[in-house]
């Protein structure tokens, strides 16, 4: 049974880290790093003579999705912890 709790708390930790990384990406979108990176896409209408285009350094839409995934992942794992606690309480109630 403790492996269930271990897996759920590991999932909650992973969700927390995902949220931290995404929040830092959003917070630092206009910091010292360039707001774009150069990538090769010669078919783009705005490509230069070498086929290079400026792509966004941080995709804010993707970061919103990452934050939502982190929220739902954390909530699902928290529910597992709550159910585990209820099961343990029920087992202890049966034994007494």
Image (cartoon, rainbow, N blue to C red):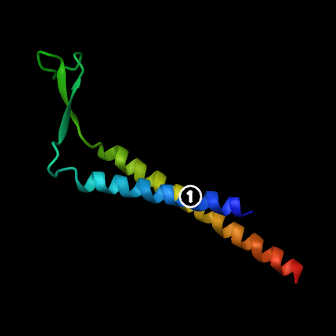
Residue depicted at 53% across the width and 55% down the height? 73
Residue depicted at 24% across the width and 20% down the height? 41
Q: Secondary structure at mark 1?
A: helix
Query: Quarter of the image containing the N terminus?
Result: bottom right
Residue depicted at 48% across the width and 56% down the height? 15
Q: Which residue in the rendered view is the most extreme toward the right?
A: 95
Quarter of the view holding residue 44: top left
Nearer to us in this view, 18 or 69: 18
78 up-or-down from 51: above or below: below
Nearer to us in this view, 2 or 85: 2
| In this picture, residue 59 sits left or right of residue 54 | right
71 up-or-down from 34: above or below: below
Residue depicted at 36% across the width and 53% down the height? 21
Quarter of the view holding residue 37: top left
Q: Position of residue 42 (x, y in %)?
A: 22, 16
How many residues crowd around disc 1 within 10 Å: few (fewer than 14), some, or many (20 or more)? some
Q: Position of residue 75 (x, y in %)?
A: 55, 62
Nearer to us in this view, 38 or 45: 38
Q: Position of residue 90 (x, y in %)?
A: 80, 75
59 up-or-down from 3: above or below: above
Q: Which residue is mark 1?
A: 10
Q: Position of residue 3 (x, y in %)?
A: 69, 59
Q: How many marks?
A: 1
| In this picture, residue 57 sits left or right of residue 62 | left
């Amino acid at each position: 049974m403790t492996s269930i709790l271990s897996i759920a708390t590991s999932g909650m930790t992973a969700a927390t880290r995902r949220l931290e990384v995404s929040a830092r990406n959003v917070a630092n979108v206009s910091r010292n790093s360039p707001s774009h990176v150069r990538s090769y896409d010669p078919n783009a209408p705005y490509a230069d003579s070498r086929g290079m285009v400026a792509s966004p350094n941080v995709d804010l839409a993707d970061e919103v999705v990452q934050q939502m995934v982190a929220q739902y992942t954390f909530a699902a794992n928290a529910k597992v912890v709550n159910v585990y606690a209820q099961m343990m309480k029920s087992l202890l109630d049966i034994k007494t």
